[in-house]
Amino acid sequence: MCLAPAIIWFLVAQAIQKIGLSTDLTRSNVTLQWVIILTIFTPICIGFFIFGYYGLKGEYDQLPTSSKDVE
Amino acid sequence: MSFVTKPSKISLVIGASSVGTLIEWYDFYIFGMLATIISKQFFPSDAGTSALLSTLAIFAAGFIVRPFGALVFGRLGDIIGRKYTFLLTLVLMGGSTFAIGLVPGFATIGWAAPILVLILRLVQGLALGGEYGGAATYVAEHAPANRRGFWTSWIQTTATLGLFLALGVIIFIRSNQGVEAFSAEWGGWRYPFWMSIILVVVSILIRMKMSESPMFTKLKSEGKTSTNPLKESFGHKANFKMVLLALFGAVMGQGVIWYTGQFYAQSFIETVCKVEFVQSRNLMLWAILFATPFFVVFGYLSDRIGRKWIMMLGMLAGILTYRPIYQYFLDATNAKNRTEKIDLAHTISSEKIATVDVKDRTKILVVQKVDTAYLDGAIFSYTKTDTLHIAAEISDINASKIQYVQVNPLDGTQFDTVLLQLKSSAGLNLDTTRISDVVVLSKSAKPTILVEKTLDHATYWNLIWLVFVQILYVTMVYGPIAAFLVELFPTKIRYTSMSLPYHIGNGVFGGLVPFLGTLIVEFTKTTDNPAGDPLAGLWYPIGVASICLFIGVIYLTNKVDKEVMD
């Protein structure tokens, strides 16, 4: 659960650093790369956070064994 | 009512599913295999590394949309059935692949070229997103419970065999055409894309004869199919939490192991180690050939001892051994570790070829390829480039040769006349009888560049075995996973529920391995260290696999679910 926001924070920090270090020639390319990376990994990290929340709540202590368990 | 299919019939089921899935993988992978050429054809000629990164990004885009294809076609498959959804995905994949082969290069249509290629790549990704979940579901729903891992593992071989087919076709065409003809705007690199339409037509004819999944047919006849499989898959917590577990506990790690062992290995050997094109691909072919049977071995084993620990062991092996393996790749292909043959007869130099610089026609670039042979049998090829600064542009544009008099810079005496073959940068045919005289004001030399390495026999086979080991990890994580995912979800939402985590794990996490790996290495480049750390890109798959291993060990069960007929 804590890893998800940590990953987002790390990616945003890297994006700011790398875009800041880029030259005028490469800035648009670098910005686009990081926009794509953040767009892809943000919803995944949200899912990861939810997964961690479920794990803490004990939702995975007993996995379902039939369809009735997931209805 | 029994859904177990007779063994003779299940072979037909697997064959029909596998052929189409294999072709779809082939279609998808030829793009990645030809990334270097595609970057030169569809992007500005002076774009360099950024063109390759953009091509890899387009390659990755096809992976990233796979989850959306999984949602769209998964929903269709759960509502209208597996068979017709299969046909649709195959038509879309074949059509878009064929169309990529028809897009003119950047030199002809400018920025429309990469935009068109991107759109077609996205269509490929959507189609593949719908294919795999259906194929695995289709086979699993025909298989007996205690053989599900074994039978579905045959589907698992299709991704690697599709890669094998893509490599084989490209090597065959490239070997018969030569580098220049293969790499030209309308050259041989397009043929693998055009071939796809023939393969797809054959596959469609086979799939038209397939019958619908018996479990789905039963559900449909009883009116129990899902009207909204998306809502049932992801709107209900009980099922949604299993989708998350499948992704973060299994498929995420499987995806990065898969793409590192096959794609990243091939890209690293070719672009970082600079192993010669045909040799690097032959190396991959051998490793794939030896390792492919192990998909079925581990699928079979998973029916006996459970699926979880085989997959976890594959991830652990990758985490622990990737860096040593790739360090060996670097060391084994390094000139510093070799003894050069000091023998002029074995230093082979090609003829010098001159080309007029298109931006400054008073500059002539003279390129010569020099091969250095080593005692162990390896040959490393270098490119030596000199720039001649001439007094005036070449007057005779049809001359095929130029000549100039070499002058001693110390006392101005003339001592030699140099004759050079001239190559037209515009691709024009030059008159072989005409020679143009030029006056050279000065000459500058660029550092010699290592272009490619032809490995000696021993090193070649060592690399094959190390790639084989990586693909062995792939067979461990990928062989059992189809059965694992099928057993996790009920029939009426199975196509939707298993497709999404599968394509996020493979499409997003796995598909981004080449792109993020290359990007991470770029980030390690500094003024003091312009080459960067070539192994830095491995931290991405190692990190993702480590998280997945941790989650999988704690939360996954090793129990094989006998009952999926609900």
Image (tube, coloured by chain):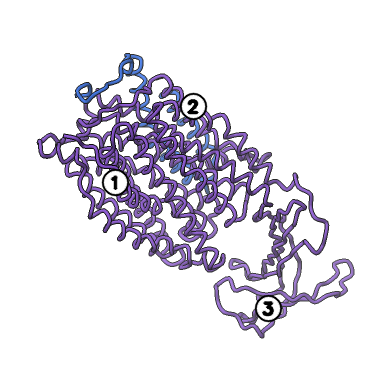
Chain colours: A blue, B purple
> Which residue is the extreme one toward the bottom?
B433
Local crowd size for mark 2, using a 10 Å CA cut-off: few (<14), some (14–19), many (≥20): some
Q: Earlier in the sequence, mark 3 or mark 1?
A: 1
Residue beneath label 1, please?
A: B8
Between B323 and B58, which is closer to the camera in this rendering?
B323
Of marks 2 and 1, which one's residue comes earlier in the chain?
A: 1
Q: CA distance from mark 2 to mark 1?
A: 41 Å
- Residue B24 vs B532, above or below: the answer is below
SS class, disc 1: helix
The residue carrying mark 2 is B546
- Element type at marker 2? helix
CA distance separating discs 3 and 1: 69 Å
Please tell me which residue is depicted at 47% across the width and 51% down the height of the picture.
B164
Residue B209: give x, y in percent of width and height: 23, 54
Percent of width and height locating residue B153: 38, 40
Q: Residue visible at 58% across and 52% down?
A: B280
Specify the subunit that label 1 lies on.
B
Q: Which residue bears the numbered disc 3?
A: B401
Q: Indicate the amino acid at tag 3.
A: Lys
Instruction: Say which of marks 2 and 3 sits in front.
Output: 2
- Report the residue at 31% width, 49% height from top: B127
Disc 1 residue type? Answer: Ser
Chain under label 2?
A: B
Q: Is residue B553 above or below residue B441?
A: above
Q: Quadrant of the C terminus of chain A?
A: top left
